[in-house]
Image (spheres, rainbow, N blue to C red):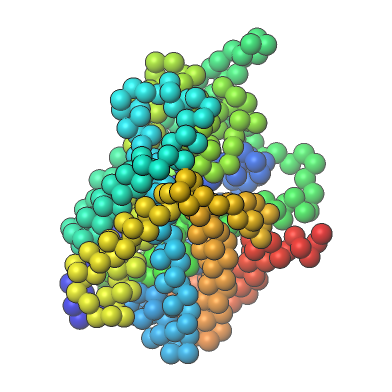
Amino acid sequence: MEKKANHFSGQLGFVMAAAGSAVGVGNLWRFPYLAAKDGGGLFLIVYLALVLTFGFTLLASDIAIGRRTKKSAIGAYTEMHPKWKFLGVLTFIVPILIMTYYAVIGGWITKYAVIYLTGASEAAAGDNYFTAFITSPVSPVVYALIFMAVTALIVYNGVRDGIEAVSKWMMPILLVLVVIVAVYSMTLQHTDESGQLRTGLAGLRYYLTPHVEGLTVGRFLQILLDAMSQLFFSLSVSMGIMITYGSYVKREVNLNHSVSQIELFDTGVALLAGAMIIPAVYVFSGVEGMSAGPSLMFISLPKVFHAMGKAGGFVGLLFFVAAIFATLTSCISVLESITANCVEVFHTERKKTVVTLSVIYLAASAVVALGYSLFYFEAKLPNGTTGQLLDVMDYVSNSVMMPFIALLSTILIGWVKKPSFVIEEMESSGHAFRRKKLYTVMIRYIAPVMMFVLFLQSTGILSGIFS
Ligand code: PHE
């Protein structure tokens, strides 16, 4: 730890890097999809309430633990309590798994940015374009390797000169791009074959209005769980990343403000992503056109861009460039967290560690990129879906491990170590921790219960009980 000349320059650099990690495909494709599915404004209200309570609790905990121990997950949990080292190791496994597929998704996005750059947007709107692309054995591998190599290069350059330097310009540009596309989206209108006129503003209204018609308790619980798992993934908590980033924050930085700013940035981009995607999809295909996950970004949106006519090619380019920035800054946070843990555990030199990990992950990314061609298989997942290699990695890390880790860490902080461990760190810069009472109640009582329910739900155990 004495060789941690590795630091963020100050609050701004830290907030931009942390927001860079938080803002990712979760904001761009998952949030809008869930909002459209889960009652528009109703989902937004539930989500906002959770950000301010639950999200804040988990984010503050991770960052404070990092800064207090000056270590990454394995070292940090060991220092908190030697018997809880296993939790550090479990946490460390999450980025290890995520890293195998995140560059593959980044590669897909890069490919689409290139499509719009070269004016091939018509082809991309074709029905089988995306499937043909990911099932080819060459192109997805090449793009994944490029994305992985760029990620590695940035991490190689260090925390301040690599990660912070890149995040400081990418994140503001991303924000501007998202605002431009959102405003454009609201001005759209289109008359379909039946003569019905749909406007972007009506789409926006659909997005913002709380739809409570026919709401049941079970359905509300579902919305609550959707919002919770989304929030959790979106803030990059419980995977050790924010612990690592926290360990690079200088003592004098006000963590209270930092946490609020990261939440604001992440939630702001999510809300704007909804305002950009939902009206556009609504105008050209009705809200029924909102599909889940990758198919929203790579199949539905290219059709929408195509329907926009000439402007669509340009709007598509802006959108995919924004998506590259979002994914790249998340990807580097994953690699950084793995690197930091390895340096701590194996006492290796940082740059050498990055090189070694890069070689490993170039190979891993290639394998996962081939998961739709050479290594194709269909796995039945406990939550009822079928998936390929990438989905299996995603399921294990996000649906099984993350809620489990969050549950255990709330017990460690709330009951074994006591909330004062985090509170003291939040106040150590001499600034007041205003949401102290809320924090204590959340970390000891509410968060553990919510995480337990979420764990049961996302592993499919809950629906097993009720069926
Ligand atoms: N938080 C990112 C998002 O919302 C995703 C992410 C996953 C980031 C894993 C880092 C690690 O998309």
Residue 155 in view (yes/no): yes
Apparent side of residue 450 relative to residue 261 in the rendered image (left or right): right
Figure check: 139 above or below 357: above
Q: Residue furthest bottom?
A: 82
Q: Of 330 and 90, which appears nearest the observer?
A: 90
Q: Quadrant of the C terminus?
A: bottom right
Q: Of 307 and 262, which appears nearest the observer?
A: 307
Q: Quadrant of residue 348?
A: bottom left
Q: Position of residue 17 (x, y in %)?
A: 31, 56
| Residue located at (27% from left, 61% from top) | 359
| Residue located at (19% from left, 67% from top) | 351
| Residue located at (32% from left, 77% from top) | 71
Apparent side of residue 267 relative to residue 463 in the rendered image (left or right): left
Q: Residue furthest front?
A: 374
Apparent side of residue 438 relative to residue 212 in the rendered image (left or right): left
Q: Position of residue 98 (x, y in %)?
A: 43, 60
Residue 67 in view (yes/no): no
Q: Of 126 and 448, which appears nearest the observer?
A: 126
| Residue located at (30% from left, 71% from top) | 340
Q: Position of residue 376 (x, y in %)?
A: 51, 50
Apparent side of residue 161 relative to residue 377 in the rendered image (left or right): left
Q: Of 106 and 133, which appears nearest the observer?
A: 133
Q: Quadrant of residue 194?
A: top right
Count numbered badges in the picture. 0
Q: Position of residue 62 (x, y in %)?
A: 43, 70
Figure check: 156 above or below 431: above
Q: Quadrant of the N terminus?
A: bottom left
